[in-house]
């Protein structure tokens, strides 16, 4: 029965002799023997197998049942049990052996183990692919969200660590100085690692510092991996910085045709990146590079737009809003003005004689002056006001909500802010300006009208010689009349409506009248006596200044001839305009006239304003020499309002400098004016010229000027301009002023 059981069965006594063995047992262990009863276990099993069985046999003979798997023959597996047999006294007298062949089971187990191993490997690989996929998709989400490059790089590194589960992600950029250096620009994975990464040398050139995955990726444009940084000689240079990371992967970041940097991923396990994973991570890096390029393009476009906006809305020199932007602000102000019944003030300010500054000091200094002017203007305006540079020397200001009071306050504020001299080229420069003021809505209800009236108000200020002027609608309505005035003026010149007025000049030291200035007046049939300020500009603009000046010259020369005949040899000065200097036959005409009237040299003088001379300095110099060649003493008028340089003044063939009335007027109240008068007098004397002060209205002015050494004085204090016919009588009755030497002698 035991031989029919599919198991190996035997009984062994305490001396390890077989007492019984079934057929299977014998076939397995002693196939060549017919019977094994009586043989020892060690005989039958053989040395090697007995060595395995012996310790277990010892135990079973001590009474402990034993079970074990063993492989008695190659490829044959058995599970064997030893069960002790006891006698009545409980002594172990032998043991049963029961063996079951488990070779099939063992084979299946091995197969399952192998399958499990394979499965594990596949799962592991899947895991790697999955982490790469997670990185890829998290990276792409990042791309959609990031608003700027830094944010993109940082969140990409973060995705590598948090979504991908890698140890560390780093992004490297090529240095922008054209060297081969690589610089870490973003990192995630180790707190504070970016600083450390930035302190180590990494390069994309071949060699010690270019052997890492970042360097290789940038150099070759290919993704590269390192299985174990701790062992790989490529990482010798950074061995102490690896902080436990073993494997590394570097993907190039490609923007167009160039590699701009690399994305590197580090992990604590060695040899962790497999082929699929590398493909996916390379794709991720490509997406990142695309994201970078897109953001850069967007940023570039934004910059271009900002530049365009700046160029089209701001003045490059002063940084102020430009004409376009001011026009838009004005339009908006008119809009809200109408809708909400809100007033506003618009002002236009022009710098006087900017051209002369440019000519005299050069454009760089002219520019510096403009910038400072803009700066001060900005400081002067109330909050919320718009200050713009329209063009050249023209500035504009808009005060939303402002009314007449606000405009007046600003005008005063501007006077204060702009009064101090400008430090241009180390010269304290007085900059004068004119402002035209327009109130919305009373002076203009459309942007067009406001703009136009700003300009007109400014001209009105100029005409009146005022620093500020509100738009004067009445005067403006006169404009068409003023135009028809041009033809009237022409008739006036031909038709004997002009008058010569004379204003005496007095020699300060002698107290005697030493000459007179001829000033034109228009005896208008309806409007009465019109002062020159109201028609000289018109004459200049229409070309009528030429016949007007000729009329003056002829009148003055006639007068001079009459005076000479009466034994009164006093020089008379005639004013020339800029347009007169441009007149090609000016010299010939004057030469002819002098000859025709037989005028003695020196009796006709000419006054030319400093600004006229400075308008085209070289040209003017030629004309002045021509006039001087005719024996005519020349005077520079309104001196101090232009910007003639000392060296230029020295070259001018002039007798006299007439210091401008504005300095004389302000002399006693303004220390700067007093200083200018004093230094001008000294300067002019140093150059061997004489100085005339005009606009002298008070005795105090006279005294001050006299003490400063001024040569000649002209002004209301001596006399207002009078009709030429009255001059003789006036002169007869003139007694030198108190304080002058002559007066002292008489007293
Ligand atoms: P200007 O050549 O500077 O003439 C001096 C002006 O100052 C004159 O004004 C004169 O009346 C004024 N004036 C003289 N003393 C005083 C004073 O003490 N106080 C004040 N406040 N003013 C004083 P006017 O006659 O109105 O002439 C104005 C300007 O018109 C002249 O300035 C000159 O540039 C121009 N002008 C006058 N006549 C002629 C002319 O025949 N030809 C040309 N081209 N311009 C002329
Ligand atoms: Ca004059
Ligand atoms: Ca003058």
Image (cartoon, grey):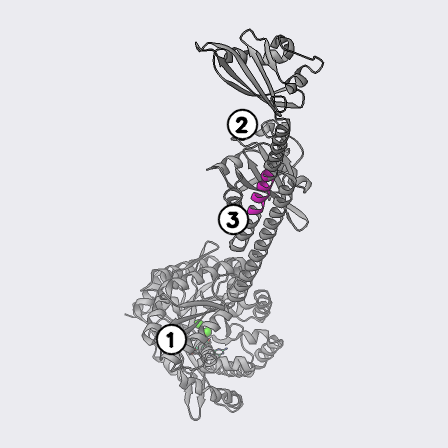
Residue ID at (41%, 61%): 376
Task: Say left or right for 408 vs 660.
Answer: left
Image quadrant where one finds the N terminus: top right
Image quadrant where one finds the C terminus: bottom left
Residue 471, position as x, y percentages in the image: 40, 80
- Residue sitting nearer the eye, 124 or 61: 61
Label 3 sits on residue: 150
Mark 3 or mark 2, earlier in chain:
3
Of the two numbered discs 1 and 3 in the rendering, the one whose residue sits closer to the viewer: 3
Task: Say left or right for 534 vs 283.
Answer: left
Residue 729, position as x, y percentages in the image: 37, 83
Report the Cα–Cα distance between label 1 and label 2.
71 Å
Residue ID at (51%, 66%): 313
Residue 681, position as x, y percentages in the image: 42, 61
Mark 1 or mark 2, earlier in chain:
2
Is 510 situated above or below 450? above
- Magenta stretch? 123-134
Label 1 sits on residue: 344
- Residue sitting nearer the eye, 665 or 509: 665
């Amino acid at each position: 029965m035991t031989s029919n059981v599919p198991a190996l069965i035997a009984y062994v006594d305490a001396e390890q002799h077989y007492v019984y063995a079934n057929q299977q047992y014998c076939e397995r262990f002693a196939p060549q023997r017919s019977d094994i009863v009586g043989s020892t276990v060690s005989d039958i099993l053989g040395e090697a197998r007995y060595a395995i069985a012996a310790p277990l046999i010892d135990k079973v003979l001590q009474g402990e049942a034993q079970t074990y798997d063993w492989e008695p023959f190659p490829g044959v597996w058995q599970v064997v049990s030893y069960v002790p047999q006891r006698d009545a006294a409980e002594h172990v007298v032998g043991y049963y052996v029961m063996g079951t062949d488990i070779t099939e089971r063992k084979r299946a187990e091995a197969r399952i183990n192998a399958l499990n191993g394979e499965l594990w490997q596949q799962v592991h690989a899947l895991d790697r692919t999955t982490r790469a996929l997670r990185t890829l998709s998290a990276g792409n989400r990042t791309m959609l969200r990031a608003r700027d490059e830094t944010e993109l790089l940082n969140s990409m590194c973060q995705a590598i660590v948090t979504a991908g589960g890698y140890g560390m992600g780093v992004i490297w950029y090529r240095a922008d100085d054209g060297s081969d250096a690589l610089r870490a620009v973003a990192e995630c994975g180790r707190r504070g690692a970016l600083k450390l990464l930035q302190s180590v040398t990494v390069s994309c050139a071949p060699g010690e510092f270019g052997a890492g995955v970042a360097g290789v990726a940038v150099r070759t444009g290919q993704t590269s991996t390192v299985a174990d940084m701790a062992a790989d000689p490529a990482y010798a240079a950074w061995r102490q910085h690896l902080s436990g990371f073993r494997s590394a992967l570097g993907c190039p970041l490609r923007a167009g045709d160039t590699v701009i940097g690399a994305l590197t991923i580090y992990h604590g396990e060695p040899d962790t990146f497999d082929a699929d994973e590398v493909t996916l991570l390379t794709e991720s890096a490509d997406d990142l590079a695309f994201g970078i390029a897109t953001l850069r393009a967007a940023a570039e476009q934004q910059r271009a737009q900002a530049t365009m906006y700046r160029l089209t809305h701001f003045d490059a020199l002063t940084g102020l809003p430009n004409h376009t932007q001011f026009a838009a602000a004005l339009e908006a102000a008119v809009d809200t003005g109408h809708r909400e019944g809100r007033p506003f003030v618009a002002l236009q300010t022009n710098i006087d004689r900017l051209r002369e500054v440019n000519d005299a000091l050069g454009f760089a200094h002219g520019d510096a002056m403009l910038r400072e002017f803009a700066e001060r203007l900005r400081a002067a305006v109330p909050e919320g006001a718009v200050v713009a540079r329209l063009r050249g020397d023209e500035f504009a200001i808009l005060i939303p909500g402002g009314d007449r009071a606000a405009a007046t306050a600003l005008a005063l504020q501007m006077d204060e802010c702009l009064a101090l001299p400008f430090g241009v080229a180390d010269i304290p420069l007085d900059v004068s300006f004119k402002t035209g003021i327009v109130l919305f809505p009373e002076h203009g209800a459309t942007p067009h009208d406001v703009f136009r009236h700003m300009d007109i108000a400014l001209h009105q200020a100029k005409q009146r010689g005022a620093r500020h002027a509100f738009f004067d609608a009445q005067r403006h309505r006169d404009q068409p009349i003023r135009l028809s005035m041009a033809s009237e003026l022409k008739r006036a010149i031909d038709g004997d409506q002009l008058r010569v007025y004379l204003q005496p000049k007095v020699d300060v030291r002698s107290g005697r009248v030493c000459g007179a200035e001829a000033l034109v007046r228009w005896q208008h049939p309806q409007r009465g006596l019109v002062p020159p300020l109201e028609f000289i500009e018109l004459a200049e603009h229409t070309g009528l200044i030429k016949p007007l000046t000729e009329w003056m010259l002829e009148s003055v020369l006639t007068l001079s001839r009459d005076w000479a005949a009466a034994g009164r040899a006093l020089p008379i000065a005639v004013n020339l305009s800029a347009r007169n200097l441009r007149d090609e036959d000016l010299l010939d005409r004057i030469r002819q006239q002098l000859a025709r009237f037989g005028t003695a040299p020196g009796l006709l003088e000419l006054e030319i304003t400093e600004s006229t001379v400075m308008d085209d300095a070289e040209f003017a110099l030629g004309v002045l020499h021509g006039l001087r060649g005719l024996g005519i003493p020349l005077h520079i008028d309104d001196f101090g309002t232009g910007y003639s340089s000392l060296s230029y003044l020295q070259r001018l063939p002039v007798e006299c400098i007439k210091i401008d009335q504005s300095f004389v007027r302000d002399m006693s109240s303004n220390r700067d004016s007093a200083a200018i008068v004093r230094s001008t007098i000294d300067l002019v004397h140093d150059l061997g010229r004489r100085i005339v002060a005009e606009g002298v209205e008070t005795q105090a002015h006279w005294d001050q000027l006299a003490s400063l050494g001024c040569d000649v004085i002209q002004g209301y204090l001596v006399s207002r301009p009078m009709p030429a016919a009255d001059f003789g009588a006036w002169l007869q009755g003139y007694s030198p002023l108190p304080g002058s030497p002559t007066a002292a002698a008489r007293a």
